[in-house]
Image (cartoon, coloured by chain):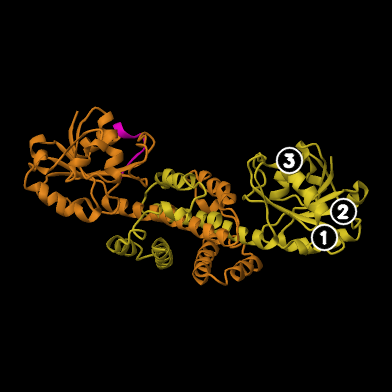
Chain colours: A orange, B yellow
């Protein structure tokens, strides 16, 4: 059992606090807004309370740009031996203040949202990292009790995976939005596309997606591509995107 | 019961022939390659056999660019009353030869592949169209026995939906490919992204996808976007795509 303080009460805290608690750890949430403590399944304390709690592990569930500042503040009140873990996909481990000897990262590879039902972590992939053998072991044990799918990645690899996730998640969702816009303009229910959207995602099994690539660009079907670009006459930005992605597909499938 | 001839033995024929047969119709497949008939659950005949079979309905499961020519050939041997249906998302109904009085379209909104297990059509969305009341009724009855999800769309709407599906299916699959490339270069298993890929698709329920949009572009987080673009130094085309999609997201979420 660890004494874990989670700093922040945002999306990630919302999902990791109950998960850590259910594993039997002694968990508190640290926030300036202790008045909203009824939303949380653990005690919510402020920074003064944190010092009395004396955690052995601190999880920084704060916005990326706050990691440096937040850990610097903590360095004034917590001993150097405290294990400090940040939870950002895009931030280097070294952003955690130099006062702390034991640092690490736990990054759940998933888009998390506050207010939704707490996620089952067992099949949620987590990338982790530690700055020395002690941190690595402690974090690996913690992660392995949380999930069955974990990846030991250094800061560079994690930043790269975070970038790759932008394409697979954020950008993909915007392609759905474009489809939605195109449908709505002509009174076509976007629902008609949900099965193909789900099928395209669910058939991914880790093999190279281009082996499943279909469509006009993949088969170099210029008449259909020209027809599509004509239909996009009123949407120059969608047409730009259409050309760019079609070019990438055509070059890619030739490899 | 209809006497249905399916012309072509490609991806669509592979999935519609067993579906039509299982509904109790008398179905034949028409192909120049009658020697491969053992692959098919119905009799495979050539064009000469087609005249003897005398179908009341012909389904054209041929490449888009063959629809006009193929239906013209049929016009020399089949009566004008034959109902001729093409199965293309991107092709206007009028491409079917003028000899035929009864025309229509059945387009399953799904990427279909030959050689895979025949799909259950019940929850496969199908767009359909007919050129007159007789065709419309006949086709609607046929479609409604195939699937529970059908949409009556004109040629313009269907072409638009086909274009929207390119974004949701073909282009999305290529975003997965980019993620795959980015991971592979740094020895990161692409499997780490499968849960987020599936989650992003499965949470679509017909509401506007932008309401679920997350990420650096959506929250106008310039430092993270700059970091990502730096990581893409060796990939100018991925960076171009990154900028274009981020701009579209930023303009779109402001609306």
Secondary-structure class at tag 1? helix
Is the residue B142 above or below the residue B182 in the image?
Answer: above
- Alpha-carbon neighbours of circle 3 within 10 Å: few (<14), some, or many (≥20)? some
Q: Which chain carries label 1?
A: B
Q: Which stretch did the figure color magenta?
A: A145-152
Regarding residue A186, the answer to whether it shows in the image is yes
* Residue highlighted by disc 2: B82
The dot on residue B93 is none
Left or right of A216, for residue A88: left
Q: Do the CB atoms of the residues marked 2 and 1 lie less than 8 Å apart?
A: no
Q: Are marks 2 and 3 on the same chain?
A: yes
Image location (x, y in percent) of residue B86: 75, 55
- Alpha-carbon neighbours of circle 1 within 10 Å: few (<14), some, or many (≥20)? many
Q: Which of marks 1 and 3 is nearer the N terminus?
A: 1
Residue at the image position 24 percent from the left and 36 percent from the top: A38
- What is the C-alpha distance between the residues marked 2 and 1? 11 Å
Is residue B33 located in the magenta-colored stretch of the structure?
no
Q: Find residue B84 and report its image quarter.
A: bottom right
Image location (x, y in percent) of residue B122: 66, 39
Which of the image's four quarters has the N terminus of chain A? top left
- What is the C-alpha distance between the residues marked 2 and 3? 20 Å
- Alpha-carbon neighbours of circle 2 within 10 Å: few (<14), some, or many (≥20)? many
* Residue highlighted by disc 1: B71
- What is the C-alpha distance between the residues marked 1 and 3? 25 Å
Q: Earlier in the sequence, mark 2 or mark 1?
A: 1
Q: Are marks 2 and 1 on the same chain?
A: yes
* Residue highlighted by disc 3: B145
Is the residue A45 above or below the residue A187 in the image?
Answer: above
């Amino acid at each position: 059992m660890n004494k874990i303080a989670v700093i922040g009460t945002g999306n990630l805290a919302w999902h990791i606090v109950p998960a850590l608690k259910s594993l039997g750890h002694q968990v508190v949430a640290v926030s300036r807004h202790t008045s909203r403590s009824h939303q949380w399944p653990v005690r919510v304390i402020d920074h003064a309370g944190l010092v009395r709690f004396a955690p052995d592990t601190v999880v920084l569930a704060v916005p990326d740009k706050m990691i440096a500042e937040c850990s610097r503040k903590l360095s004034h009140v917590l001993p150097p031996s405290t294990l400090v873990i940040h939870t950002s996909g895009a931030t280097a481990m070294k952003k955690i203040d130099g006062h702390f000897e034991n640092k690490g990262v736990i990054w759940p590879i998933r888009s998390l949202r506050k207010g939704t039902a707490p996620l089952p972590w067992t099949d949620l992939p987590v990338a982790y990292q530690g700055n020395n053998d002690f941190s690595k072991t402690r974090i690996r044990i913690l992660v392995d009790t949380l999930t069955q799918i974990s990846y030991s990645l250094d800061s560079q690899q994690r930043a790269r995976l975070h970038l790759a996730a932008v394409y697979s998640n954020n950008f993909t969702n915007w392609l759905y939005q474009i489809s939605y816009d195109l449908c709505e303009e002509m009174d076509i229910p976007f629902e008609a596309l949900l099965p193909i959207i789900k099928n395209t995602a669910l058939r991914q099994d880790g093999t190279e997606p281009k082996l499943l690539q279909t469509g006009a660009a993949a088969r170099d079907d210029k008449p259909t591509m020209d027809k599509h670009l004509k239909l996009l006459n009123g949407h120059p930005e969608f047409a730009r995107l259409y050309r760019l992605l079609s070019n990438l597909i055509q070059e890619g499938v030739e490899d």
